[in-house]
Image (spheres, grey):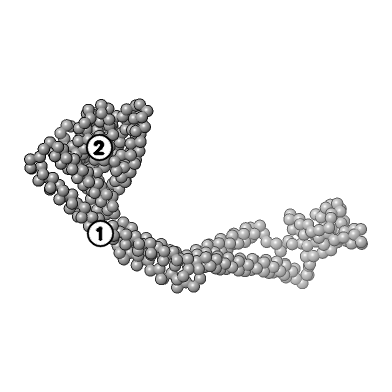
Amino acid sequence: MYRRSLRKRVAIAFAICIATLSVVWGLAFFAAIRLSEDRVLVNQLQRAAESYPSLTTNLRGYDEARSLPEPLREWGQTNPDEGLYEFAAEELHVAVVPVDNEQRNAFVVFDVAGIEAASSEDWWWLLLITGVVGALGVIGFGLGIVVMRRAVAPVWQLAKMVENIDLENLSAGDHKRIEASRFGDDEVGMLAETIEKTVERISAFVARERYFTSSASHELRTPITVITGALELLEQSELSTTDVEVVARIRRATLEMRTTIEMFLCLARETDDGLYEEQFLVMPLVRQAIDQQRYLLNDKSVDVEIDLIDIEIGDLSKPMARGHAQAFSIAVNNLVRNAFEHTLDGQGPITIHVDERELFITNQVRSDSDERHMSIEAASPNGYGLGLGIVQRLCERNGWLFSLRADEVSVAARLSW
């Protein structure tokens, strides 16, 4: 479609625009010069016609300064240098010419009275010229826009094609909308081809992601369900104390594995059928996380305090958050687990503050140098369980805010919605 490269087309466009403007301006100046010449000759001829049959000449020569017209005599006696002089008030132009081997000066006087335009006429001409110049400027600007639009039209077409692609819901055929073959072999064609291939790869990746999450969701949860069922059968049988403890550990490990699978599947999904816009109750999820992770405090003398700010005790109708309820449960479970797991014996209490817009979890740590180092290291994004980086990603996906503050005294995690 386009035989020349984009760089050459832009250069040609500039050259055409500049050449056209140069020709137009040259013609305008040439016309102005010719108009001025014709105007002077017409005025001079008209003045001569008015004095017919006694023709007078506007040019006169004077050999001495005292023979000059009265307004010029005093000036001529000052022995002016050779050159041209203008006396606007007297409407006279004077040329000083040296004669007699430059021993004295002669004078040529040109009387322009009636030839030069009046001041009011000059203003009209200035207004006309200004209008012409402005019109040429507008024409040049419009011409430049037209030429440049034609030069960069392929880029604009490519931008519109890319704009029409829904990046939030890529389909397998979205790459075909670009039609890189329409742009030839220039720079725009290369860019279109690259974008087309990139969108094609992204579309294929999204399709693989959807297939993986749909398949993995079933394939990974099935073994967990089987193990959970087997544990329920074991618990119904007569077990020794040691076996009961082993079954409890297996159940906790299974629960952690289920949570881990749900977490990674939640992060892997690009879309989740609008579940990121649902409203859900916060307190049931918080209490569920505390119950699931309470076993971590079995061998520790640590209390858990739940502070419901501006919320009546037992009122589960608030607070409410908006987003993915499963993602919120995963994030709260991770934060509660971190607090329970990294709080040492006797370093409680662990406080959980809940109000209308945020969840605040604080756990105490020791202040001596060894345990201070341990607590600060545990507070890093990669130090808690699966990592607070995962919690951060879940919050970003749902539009929540997450922050962590750690020092030698305490670690505080804040989750706002």
Residue 399 can be seen, yes or no: no
Identify the residue at image location x=83%, y=58%: 82
CB atoms at circles 1 and 2 under 8 Å apart?
no
Q: How many callouts does the rendering have? A: 2
Q: Give the image location of residue 325, x and y in percent.
A: 22, 45
Tag 1: residue type?
A: Tyr
Q: Give the image location of residue 310, x and y in percent.
A: 22, 31
Which residue position holds label 2?
336
Identify the residue at image location x=58%, y=65%: 18
**Depth order, front residue of 127/326:** 326
| Image position of 162 (left or right of 241) | right
**Depth order, front residue of 313/331:** 331
Residue 297 can be seen, yes or no: yes
Q: CA distance from mark 1 to mark 2?
A: 32 Å
Q: Earlier in the sequence, mark 1 or mark 2?
A: 1
**Depth order, front residue of 101/268:** 268
Identify the residue at image location x=59%, y=60%: 130
Looking at the rendering, which quadrant does residue 100 occupy? bottom right
- In the displayed structure, 61 sits above or below 242; it is below
Q: Give the image location of residue 212, x and y in percent.
A: 26, 57
Identify the residue at image location x=12%, y=48%: 229
Tag 2: residue type?
A: Val
What is the crowding at mark 1: few (fewer than 14 residues within 10 Å), some, or many (at least 20)?
few
- In the displayed structure, 205 sits above or below 296; it is below
Q: Give the image location of residue 1, x and y in percent.
A: 45, 73
Which residue position holds label 1?
211
| Image position of 167 (left or right of 248) | right
Secondary element at tag 1: helix
- In the displayed structure, 251 sits above or below 110; it is above
Q: Quadrant where the C terminus lies? A: top left
Secondary element at tag 2: helix
| Image position of 314 (left or right of 350) | left
